[in-house]
Image (cartoon, grey):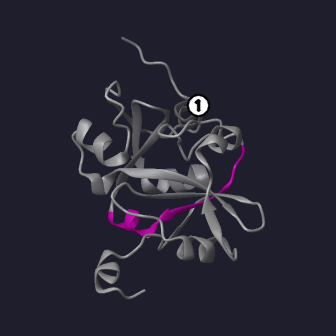
Amino acid sequence: MKQAKTNAMRLLDREGILYDVWTYENNDGKIDGVSVAKKIGKDPKTVYKTLVTKGSSGTIYVFVIPVEAELDLKKAAKAAQEKKVELLPVHEIEKHTGYVRGGCSPIGMKKQYATFIDETALQLKKIIVSAGKIGMQIELCVDDLQKMTGAKLVDLVKEKEKEKDGHN
């Protein structure tokens, strides 16, 4: 059965970038990144989620981080050179990106937003991100994702040890 291509996949094809497609069943409603990693049989450390934020200036930013991690909003604001960034309310995601929550790809949004990928991606050759549709993921080289999004690689996630110690 031939799979319908998503906008992200069409853009990758146009640039001649190789990628693998992973599909998963989503009837159970479990579309969080850790569940998706299990469903496609991949290490959660290689699966990244796309988070869309708005800075205090009103500018939209995209952050791509490991599914098990939590975005450190202070680090995100620093990366974006904003006083503060906040996650975009779910009902605004589609309006700004063209994608729905759980199916938001960093590639092929309505506009090209400043994009940041967590530096942990540097330890991997390939990472998995949403293909732009719930139930579909794409695996591609980190360099290719960076090329397609113009992303900067920076430290973006909360450090678990510090949280346990009560230090920030």
Res 130 visible = yes
Seen from the viewer's position, the closer of residues 136 and 18 is 136
Q: Is residue 77 left or right of residue 127?
A: right
Coordinates of residue 136 in the picture (x, y in percent): 41, 31
Which x, y percent locates residue 67?
A: 37, 54
For the residue pair 53 and 16, the one nearer the viewer reads as 53
Q: Quadrant of residue 18?
A: top left
Q: Which residue is mark 1?
A: 7
Tell me: residue 133, above or below residue 158. Answer: above
Callout 1 secondary element: helix
Q: Is residue 113 above or below residue 37?
A: below
Tell which residue pokes out farthest to the top in this image: 1
Q: Quadrant of the C terminus?
A: bottom left
Q: Position of residue 52 (x, y in %)?
A: 59, 53
Residue at 28% in and 52% down: 44
Amino acid bearing label 1: Asn
Residue depicted at 51% across the width and 24% down the height: 5
Residue stretch rendered in magenta on the structure: 111-123
Does the stretch in magenta take in 155? no
Note whether 2 is above or below 99 in the view shown. Answer: above
Label 1 crowd bin: few (<14), some (14–19), many (20+), radius 10 Å = some
Question: Which residue is at the front of the view, 138 or 144?
Answer: 138
Q: Horizontal placement of 92 versus 90: left or right? A: right
Tell me which residue sits at (47%, 74%) in the image.
155
